[in-house]
Image (cartoon, grey):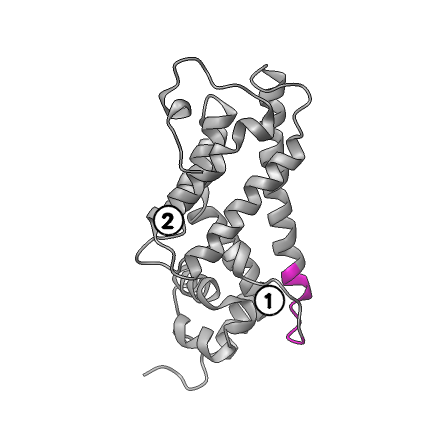
């Protein structure tokens, strides 16, 4: 029999994963301490001893989310041979990631905390806001590389185009949370990519079947 008052031992990483899913589903403010400890299978003293605070737990959960749930979204951005393929892959991978049947729909970075309130969430909101801004920066960098390589015209508004596609992705997150199907999100991705040449001033590659395909938008 365990000594009375001794904290229960638990798998920290497993508990963090459960906290991440609860934050993902309910947001920082919506996930109460009692719900977190129940999901993690620990008591409040153990939570504070292991993670320091609810805010610190959330930051660790966001870090875990970035390592485990979003890499495939950014893989195309890093590996695709052209910027257009990179952005197409980015949105299509988003449609799949945001509609996994066994996980909360949408994106923790987008939905986790949008407004600071009296729960002390100012730092949480600021951290997520920075991550969302970093996404724009990263996509803009991929566009600048395309300009340097001659794929896109020198006058391309890389920051504006990146902001547009991040806005589309964030909208996909909200749509997914509201119950939109994967097929609907893929159609949104196709519609956004139909705007590519108008936004960038680029031109379809000769003989590109995907670019020549007619779209309903």
Q: Residue furthest bottom?
A: 4
> Which mark, by number, is residue 96?
none
> Badge 1: how crowded within 10 Å, few (<14), some, or many (20+)?
some
The quadrant in which residue 91 appears is top left
Which residue is disc 2 drawn over?
Answer: 184
Disc 2 to disc 1, C-alpha distance: 34 Å
Does residue 88 appear in the picture of this structure?
yes
Pick the residue in front: 208 or 1: 208
Residue 126 pos. (x, y %): 67, 57
Callout 1: SS: helix
Which residue sits at x=54%, y=55%?
A: 110
84 inside magenta stretch: no
Callout 2: SS: helix
Foreground mark, 2 or 1, reads 2
The quadrant in which residue 58 appears is bottom right
Q: Of marks 2 and 1, which one's residue comes earlier in the chain? A: 1
Does residue 7 appear in the picture of this structure?
no
Q: Which residues are magenta?
A: 118-125
Which residue sits at x=49%, y=38%?
A: 192
> Which mark, by number, is residue 55?
1
Q: Is residue 4 above or below residue 95?
A: below
Which residue sits at x=40%, y=58%?
A: 105
Image quarter (top left, top right, bottom left or bottom right) of the C terminus:
top left
Q: How many marks?
A: 2
Residue 26 pos. (x, y %): 47, 68
Q: Is residue 193 above or below residue 60?
A: above
Q: Is residue 45 above or below residue 12?
A: below
């Amino acid at each position: 029999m365990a000594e009375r008052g001794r904290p229960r031992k638990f798998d920290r990483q497993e508990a963090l994963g459960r906290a991440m899913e609860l934050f993902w589903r309910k947001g920082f403010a919506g996930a109460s301490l009692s719900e977190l400890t129940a999901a993690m299978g620990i008591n409040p003293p153990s939570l504070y001893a292991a993670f320091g605070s609810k805010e610190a737990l959330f930051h660790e959960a966001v870090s875990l989310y970035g390592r485990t749930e979003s890499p495939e979204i950014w893989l195309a951005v890093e590996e695709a041979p052209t910027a257009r393929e990179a952005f197409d892959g980015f949105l299509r991978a988003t449609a799949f990631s945001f509609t996994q049947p066994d996980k909360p729909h949408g994106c923790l970075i987008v939905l986790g905390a949008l407004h600071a309130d009296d729960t002390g969430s100012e730092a949480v909101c600021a951290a997520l806001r920075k991550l969302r801004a970093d996404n724009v920066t990263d996509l803009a960098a991929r566009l600048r590389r395309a300009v340097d390589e001659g794929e896109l015209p020198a006058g391309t508004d890389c920051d504006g185009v990146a902001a547009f596609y991040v806005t589309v992705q964030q909208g996909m997150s909200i749509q997914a949370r509201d119950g939109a199907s994967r097929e609907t999100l893929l159609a949104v991705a196709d519609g956004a990519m139909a705007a590519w040449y108008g936004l960038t001033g680029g031109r379809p590659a000769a003989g590109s079947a995907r670019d020549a395909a007619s779209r309903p938008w």
